Amino acid sequence: MLKRVFLFAALFWTGIILFFCLIKSSDIPKVNIQNLDKVIHSGFHFVFTILWFLYLKKKFTSSNNFKLLTFTIIGSFVLGIAIELMQQYFTTTRSADVFDVLANLFGAFLAAFSIILLNAINGIVDKI
């Protein structure tokens, strides 16, 4: 049951990322905070990495956390590059930005670090 919840949440969150990264930029409210978009990218991929890790942890119970985290970070990276390519070639108001990909990776690595830290402190990940 919990595996399905994590899968639904991970798929839903992936859809949220795709939606907000591919809508017309004129539909996004303008906020004059420097690099806010990079913080948002990091946050998107932080949650993405955690949700997909939790799903994979439930699906492949015998796999070690490092292997699953590596897989989810690679997934985040691939999704980030795919979105940037879609922005460049399939939208008229968005363009690719290598710093968005770096922000995505930062969020994914921060999630992985958080998972490792939480598990080291009290084994919370292994209890899921």
Image: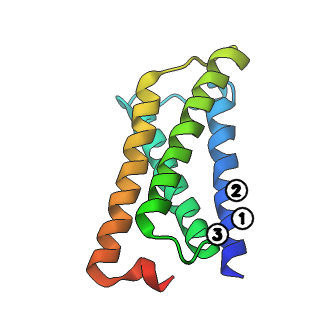
| Disc 1 and disc 3 in contact, CB within 8 angstroms | yes
User: What's the amino acid at mark 3?
Assistant: Phe
Residue at figure coordinates x 72%, y 82% from the top left: 1
Seen in the picture, residue 83 relative to 72 is either above or below; the reply is: above
Q: Which residue is mark 1?
A: 8
Nearer the observer: mark 3 or 2; the answer is 3
Q: Nearer the viewer, residue 64 or 52?
A: 64
119 left or right of 125 in image: left
* Residue occupying the point 28% across, 76% down: 120
Q: Looking at the image, which residue is at 55% across and 35% down?
A: 80
Distance of mark 1 from mark 3, alpha carbons?
5 Å
Quarter of the image for residue 96 reads top right
Q: Nearer the viewer, residue 58 or 42?
A: 58
Residue 6, which numbered label?
Answer: 3
Label 1: which secondary element: helix
User: Marks 3/2: CA distance?
Assistant: 10 Å
Residue 118: give x, y in percent of width and height.
33, 73
Disc 1 marks a residue whose amino acid type is Phe
Q: Residue at x 45, y 53 (%)?
A: 70
Q: 114 or 70, which is in the foreground?
A: 70
Q: Secondary structure at mark 2?
A: helix
Within 10 Å of disc 3 (Cα), the crowding (few <14, some 14-19, many 20+) is: many
Examine the image and state in which quarter residue 119 appears.
Answer: bottom left
Seen as rendered, the residue at the extreme front is 62
**Dot 2 surroundings within 10 Å: few (below 14), some, or many (20 or more)?**
some
